[in-house]
Image: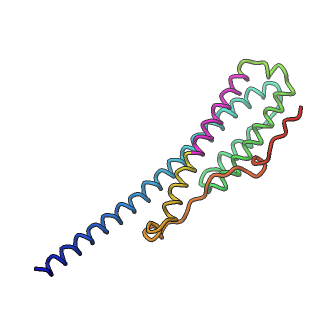
Amino acid sequence: MEILIGIGALLIVAVCVALWVVTVKNRFRRLIVKIGEGESGIDVALTKRYDTLTKMLDVCRQYAAHEVETFAKTIEMRRGMSMPERQAASAQMDDMAARLNVVAEQYPELRSADVFRDLQAGIRDTEEHLQAARRLYNANVSAFNQYLATWPYRVIGKEYKPYAFFEAEAAKRADISMKL
């Protein structure tokens, strides 16, 4: 009788451990899906940014000759990129947005146009969405990486590798000079 109780207890422990392992593996899988969702959110925001900047460029073309080729190359290069490569592409688009603002400063009538102001507001909105998407991605990566780094979960998750965070470029980490 004692043997049956011992075997029953071992069986219960084995079932509990098996259920726990399945739960942990499912948690890893859910986090991977959330990370993919975060990446997709960044891509959606970058596409929205591309579309908005392209429209802004079309308005700017009425006042000055500019090419959209850099935008098209950036968006095309982004497909299939790793997160660090996406960061580099994002930096290229930041540079293009800055150049568009320089063009606008050279043409005061463009700056005062309602369409241009609306586009600038759209860009600000797009940038806010992009930042939110990046934060969501990083939060999911953080949860996954923390889970992966802690014992006993790392034993079960040894088949997974940590994900890279979306990080700001070094130039954007520097303090901004506000001298006029």
State left or right for residue 2 relative to residue 142.
left
Q: Position of residue 42 (x, y in %)?
A: 58, 44
Q: Locate residue 110: give its quadrant.
A: top right
Q: Locate residue 129: give its quadrant.
A: top right
Residue 71, compared with residue 143, is above or below; it is above
Indicate whether residue 116 is drawn in magenta: no
| Most foreground residue, 110 or 174 | 174
Q: Which residues are magenta?
A: 117-135
Q: Residue furthest left?
A: 1
Q: Residue furthest bottom?
A: 3
Which scheme is used to colour this image of the protein?
Answer: rainbow
Residue at x 73% of width, y 47% of height:
91
Residue 4, compared with residue 149, is above or below; it is below
Residue at x 46% of width, y 54% of height:
31
State left or right for residue 175 relative to residue 72.
right
Q: Position of residue 174 (x, y in %)?
A: 79, 47
Q: Considering the image in quadrants, where does the N terminus appear? A: bottom left
Q: Considering the image in quadrants, where does the C terminus appear? A: top right
Residue at x 78% of width, y 28% of height:
61
| Most foreground residue, 149 or 105 | 149
Q: Residue furthest front?
A: 2
Main secondary structure type of the part rendered in magenta: helix
Indicate whether residue 128 is drawn in magenta: yes
State left or right for residue 50 relative to residue 100.
left
Q: Position of residue 114 (x, y in %)?
A: 72, 18
Q: Position of residue 104 (x, y in %)?
A: 81, 28
| Most foreground residue, 89 or 167 | 167
Residue at x 34% of width, y 64% of height:
20
Number of numbered markers: 0
